[in-house]
Amino acid sequence: MAALSTRGLVSRLHHHFLSLPKQSPATPNPLASHPLTRRFFSSDSLMDGAYILHQQPTRIITATPSVMTPNSRRTGIIAVKCGMTALWDKWGARLPITILWVDDNIVSQVKTVEKEGIFALQIGCGHKKPKHLTKPEVGHFRAQGVPLKRKLKEFPVTEDALLPVGTSLGVRHFVPGQYVDVSGTSRGKGFQGGMKRWGFKGMPASHGASLSHRSIGSTGQRDAPGKVFKGKKMPGRMGGKTRTVKNVWVYKIDPARNLMWVRGQVPGAEGNFVFIKDSVYKKPDVSMLPFPTYFAAEDEDETNIGPLVADLGEVDPFMVAD
């Protein structure tokens, strides 16, 4: 009954507003700011074409460099894991390296508080044919006016870090020497036992362990509590989950090929997508980061720029201190 009465009230208000005389565009409409009209009518136009609500002013987002503050939060980028190798720095130290390829990242959608309730940027990576996408996905890209992308990822940002749709992002979004957090889907290893999955010791290898050498042992107690507690480490499916490696050091970037060398391992197999953003714990110096991203000069040719390596200092770490 309450729903029916509310529906009837809305209908009566609707007919009442329709019966009011129309005003010229130059005359301000008092109904535009009335709380009842804002509450019951989300559309700008009524059935007879009369306008009772004014549209919110469109937020203007420009691709211009600005000053980053300690509370600013930049967007991340999407990369493809190419594999691992090893390099030696100028001091002769061996570094385990993962190579990441930033494949044509662009801003495919901008989300604001006025419309979606959050400040975020949707980033697209790679290329894909229309026949390999669903119709809603193709419609989304065409509505935004951007090329068809293979992978999409949303990154929450602050208001001062918004970028217009179509802005290109490359490896120069990050600076050699800074720390980043890399997220991805770990390698799936299928159904595994307790020793491989959790590192259990297993049962005795010789006496008193007939056909149970790799068993996990007891999983519960006696009559009290009479059950196996949730979360017990047991055999099961291993891998294939989203994991984040924090504080990954950026050793080198190559703007000409959009490649990034980072120290250590990152989740996923070769060819998988990974998501890179500024580190949360080891925050980089805001004065060294391009904000909201790196904008190349008009006369700059990135194909002629050599690799940029992190500054390793002038002190040999292998020299014995005096």
Image (cartoon, rainbow, N blue to C red):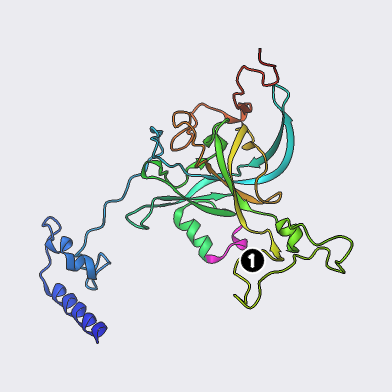
Is the residue 45 above or below the residue 62 in the image? below
Point out the image quarter for the C terminus: top right
Direction top: furthest residue: 322
Give the residue drawn at x 64%, y 66%: 232
Q: Amino acid at mark 1?
A: Lys
Can see residue 127? no
Can see residue 120? yes
Give the residue drawn at x 24%, y 81%: 7
Percent x, y of residue 134: 56, 65
Direction bottom: furthest residue: 1
Percent x, y of residue 62: 38, 40
Q: Which residue is mark 1?
A: 232
Would you say 147 lies left or right of 68 here? right
Would you say 166 lies left or right of 231 here? left
Tell which of 34 and 249 is nearer to you.
249
Quadrant in the rendering for residue 131:
bottom right
132 part of magenta stretch: yes
Is the residue 261 above or below the residue 55 in the image? above
Give the mark count.
Answer: 1
Point out the image quarter for the N terminus: bottom left
Percent x, y of residue 200: 74, 58
User: Which stretch did the figure color magenta?
Assistant: 127-135
Percent x, y of residue 273: 62, 50
Q: Residues within 10 Å of mark 1 (few under 14, many from 20)?
A: few
Tell which of 259 and 50 is nearer to you.
259
72 part of magenta stretch: no
Element class at badge 1: loop
Is the residue 32 above or below the residue 281 in the image? below
Give the residue drawn at x 47%, y 52%: 145
